[in-house]
Image (cartoon, rainbow, N blue to C red):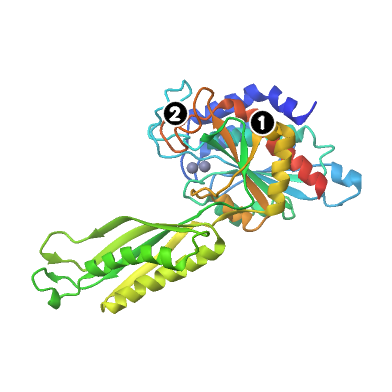
Amino acid sequence: MGVRDDAEAIAPELVGLRRAIHREPEIGLDLPGTQRKVLAALDGLPLEISLGTALSSVTAVLRGEGAAALGRNAKGGPVVLLRGDMDALPVAERTGLDYASQIEGAMHACGHDLHTAMLAGAARLLAARQRELPGMVVFMFQPGEEGHAGARHMIAEGVLDAAGQRPAAAYALHVASADWPAGVISTRPGPMLAAAEVLAVTVHGHGGHGSEPYHAADPIPAACEMVTALQTLVTRKFDVFDPVVITVGSFHAGTTDNVIPDDATFLATVRSFSPGARDKVRESALALVGGIASAHGLTVSAEFRDGYPVTVNDEAETRFAAGVAADLLGEECCVAQLNPMTGAEDFSFVLEQVPGAFLMLGACPPGADPATAPNNHAPDAVFDDSVLADGAALYAELALQRLALS
Ligand SMILES: [Zn+2]
Ligand SMILES: [Zn+2]
């Protein structure tokens, strides 16, 4: 039987695992209950399992026996890494599903429960093919994707070297509750998702009486100038076809009308779609706020807080992965994505070191219109279980075919 049939045969178990994880969502880097469920799902499989220390990650290595048989590589052949993230969001669920979250204020609103179940399914499918598997597979079960840079922590703890040699390729799937019909794969070579960072600025002046600003050093007008100048920076310094978004979403200063405060602070989210634009916006935004502050005789503390880099899909790996998806699921289920998405992903940290591809998988429920269905992160976002078997089969097929290529 083929991988897709085998995946179909374990679909009920994948649905059970997905729903169990959905009922008990956990947020951030520490997901002990989810980790337990993953370990139970992997129990009995011929995997080398290691657990994270700074986070509740699960790294599982499957050593295929097919490479030695081919006489290709005495160390066990090439390595492919498959990643599934496992964390939920601080969202109060409003789906009304019978398997809805039982944890107040937490919900799998980004579908990571499906990723976890699909990756566990892929481990089952590939373990059953251990004898002919021409290489090794690293299964990366990752906490803390939603703003906690879990992938960076797992890299620091050695996930990229878990099999004893670097992966030749890395793949991740991400479900979407809207935008695509269920079962449709969408990806693009090059930038796939934005870089997202926080620009934090504090303008330092000297407080005083509002009636005598010349005896004080007022930080508010300078901070206001910075906000508008950042918008001008976007339009005058950046290629319109390599865009940058700067949005000041928080601005705070002062206590009342007639007191000049010491400080004014603001926070901006900064999005960019190429490593070059990311470097340039970091440098030019800091120079801009520094210049405006000094023009007014003030000082400023400004920094870019750790964010996620651009998720860049490798050209060849993306072509390969799209081809595998089209063979497995049918040409009609594979669409080219015209533009990158404005969200961000910490799989970007993996793709900075390993060529690979990030693929979207439509999971819009039947009967809902992908154009209007609630999007990922919405409290009423619904991800359809019917894609679990295909997702698991695609993960497995990507590894099988990529290892056969190497
Ligand atoms: Zn998300
Ligand atoms: Zn996500």
| Mark 2 Cβ and ligand 1 under 8 Å apart | no
Pick whichever of labels 1 and 2 is earlier in the sequence.
2
Whole-percent x and y of residue 148? 48, 50
Query: Pointer 2: residues within 10 angstroms few (<14), some, or many (20+)?
Result: many
Q: Quadrant of residue 45?
A: top right
Seen in the picture, residue 341 relative to 210 is either above or below; the reply is: above
- Is residue 396 visible in the rendered structure shown here? no
Q: Which numbered circle lies on residue 390?
A: 1
Vertical side of 65 occupied by 264: above or below: below
Front residue of 136 and 382: 382
Residue with the mark numbered 2: 101
| Left or right of residue 204, residue 87 in this image | right
> What x and y, as percent, mark residue 281?
46, 66
Decide if residue 56 is in sight here.
yes
Three-letter residue code for mark 2:
Ser
- Give the answer, above or below, for where 233 lies relative to 340: below
Which element type, helix, strand or loop, lies under badge 1?
Answer: helix
Q: Nearer the viewer, mark 1 or mark 2?
A: 1
Q: Residues within 10 Å of mark 1 (few under 14, many from 20)?
A: many
| Residue 272 place in picture, x, y as percent | 49, 58
Q: Amino acid at mark 1?
A: Asp
**C-alpha separation, residue under disc 1 versus residue under disc 2:** 24 Å
Q: Is residue 87 left or right of residue 133?
A: left
Identified at 38% across, 32% down, the residue is: 104
Q: Position of residue 144 (x, y in %)?
A: 51, 46
